[in-house]
Image (cartoon, rainbow, N blue to C red):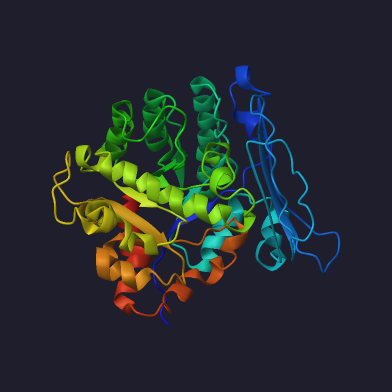
């Protein structure tokens, strides 16, 4: 098969533990620390572990659970007092061992793109997924944490030297600071996206008028909002422990998928896309299938009673907003791909490797695997791999 061009719409950096010491403003140093590493197993037969933790001084102890290797017949031990922490165990040495030895440096990403046939890569956080998820974090501190991460990422993408682009990470506690950060990151570093966690920060929703300046900046600068969730973070604690306190095996799935659907509702039904017709929103790592159902259900309401009726405050249907201004990333073997292409349109579909995270271990074959998806034509697959990513990220 001939090589196809590929925009990797969602890959991840592996931030160094020294990030905050080197980049956080001096008045905030010591208030946040993080640890992120792939750790070699003590026995050759054991899997590697990726250990991610973020600790903030004012966040109360949060019981996390350690993923069991094969079974959950023992009481999970507390992991640490953390804003967010996640431990994955799987045999990843084959896929990530050499990159861990390099410390996931800039050369790692150059080599991975060459090995995997990736023409453009958008880099989202790992530690940064949790770094401002303390509910009680004051706005000034949250903004400083995001600035520190973004400055580090700007330096890191410069070291990579092209083809890999950062996603500016923002916090909406201070919308004015967030809008300024979007402008700084795009103009100074050439970032191609703006990362937003779908879990709302206290007292702020994406459809609040105060946030319009953020979305206006994104539209003006031709960068999308990349909605990328994180599981087990402090801002999810209202939903996950209430509904699923003991179901570790599905908490992450709910946080990612349901969280993204709620955020989609806020952008569409809250009038954000109506007020900002030039704004693009990409929903990442939450599966694609829900896009074939949820926009139509937002319009049709309970038992379809509102189907076809005008929605107050909107001039279009939710399906039209999604089809015209939204994108959604599909796994390489996502069964929802043909359904979304049929019901919403192929133009909304993206795909990604999730490189940097254990579940992204198929990064080297991602584009080839995607070309084997059943139910859509090869020409459609090529457009999803390249053309849609070019449009989504404004290349």
Q: Is residue 115 left or right of residue 270?
A: right
The N terminus lies in which quarter of the figure? bottom left
Instruction: State the residue in front, 207 or 355.
Output: 207
The answer to whether residue 21 is above or below residue 339 is above
Whether residue 192 appears in this view of the structure is: no
* Residue 244 in the image: above or below residue 118: above
At 55% from the left and 33% from the top, the residue drawn is 132
Q: Position of residue 359 (x, y in %)?
A: 59, 62
Residue 68 picture quarter: bottom right
Q: On the picture, is 119 further left or further right than 376?
A: right
Position in image of residue 75 (x %, y %): 78, 52
* Percent position of residue 348, x then y: 30, 60
Q: Quadrant of residue 174?
A: top left
**In which image quadrant can residue 25 be found?**
top right
Q: Which residue appears at 47% of the width and 75% of the height?
A: 368
Count every numbered label the image shows and give the total.
Answer: 0
Of all residues, the one furthest to the bottom in this rendering is 1
User: In this rendering, is residue 370 above or below 177?
Assistant: below
Residue name at image x 76 percent, y 64 percent: 47
Q: Is residue 272 rendered to the left or right of residue 50?
A: left
| Residue, far right | 43
Residue 151 point in image, percent of width and height: 52, 33
Residue, far top: 27
Q: Nearer the viewer, residue 322 or 128?
A: 322
Decide: is 68 above or below 264. Answer: below
The answer to whether residue 242 of the structure is visible from this angle is: yes
């Amino acid at each position: 098969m001939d090589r196809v061009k590929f925009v990797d719409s969602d890959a991840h950096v592996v931030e160094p533990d020294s990030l905050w010491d080197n980049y956080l403003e001096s008045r905030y140093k010591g208030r946040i620390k993080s640890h992120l590493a792939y750790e070699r197993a003590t026995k050759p037969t054991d899997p590697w572990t990726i250990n991610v933790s973020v600790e903030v001084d004012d966040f109360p102890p949060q019981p996390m659970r350690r993923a069991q290797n094969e079974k959950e017949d023992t009481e999970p031990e507390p992991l640490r007092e953390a804003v967010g922490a996640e431990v994955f165990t799987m045999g990843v040495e084959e896929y990530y061992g050499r990159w861990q030895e390099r410390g996931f440096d800039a050369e790692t990403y150059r080599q991975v793109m060459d090995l995997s046939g990736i023409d453009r890569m958008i880099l989202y956080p790992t530690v940064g997924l949790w770094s401002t998820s303390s509910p009680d974090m004051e706005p000034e501190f949250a903004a400083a944490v995001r600035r520190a991460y973004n400055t580090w990422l700007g330096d890191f993408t410069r070291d990579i030297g092209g083809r890999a682009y950062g996603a500016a990470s923002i916090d909406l506690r201070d919308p004015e600071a967030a809008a300024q950060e979007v402008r700084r990151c795009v103009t100074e570093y050439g970032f191609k996206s703006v990362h937003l966690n779908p879990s709302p920060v206290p007292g702020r929703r994406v459809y609040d008028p105060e946030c319009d300046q953020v979305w206006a900046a994104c539209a003006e600068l031709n960068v999308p909002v990349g909605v990328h969730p994180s599981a087990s973070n402090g801002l999810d604690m209202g939903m996950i422990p209430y509904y699923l306190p003991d179901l570790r095996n599905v908490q992450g799935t709910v946080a990612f998928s349901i969280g993204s659907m709620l955020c989609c509702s806020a952008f569409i039904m809250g009038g954000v896309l109506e007020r900002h017709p030039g704004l693009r929103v990409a929903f990442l790592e939450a599966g694609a299938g829900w896009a074939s159902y949820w926009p139509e259900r937002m319009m049709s309401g309970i038992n379809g009673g509102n189907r076809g009726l005008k929605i107050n405050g909107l001039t279009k249907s939710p399906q039209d907003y999604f089809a015209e201004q939204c994108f959604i990333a599909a796994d390489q073997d996502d069964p929802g791909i043909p359904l979304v292409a049929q019901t919403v349109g192929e133009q909304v579909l993206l795909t990604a490797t999730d490189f940097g995270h254990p579940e992204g271990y198929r990064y080297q074959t991602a584009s080839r695997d995607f070309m084997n998806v059943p139910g859509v034509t090869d020409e459609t697959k090529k457009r999803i791999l390249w053309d849609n990513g070019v449009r989504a990220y404004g290349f």
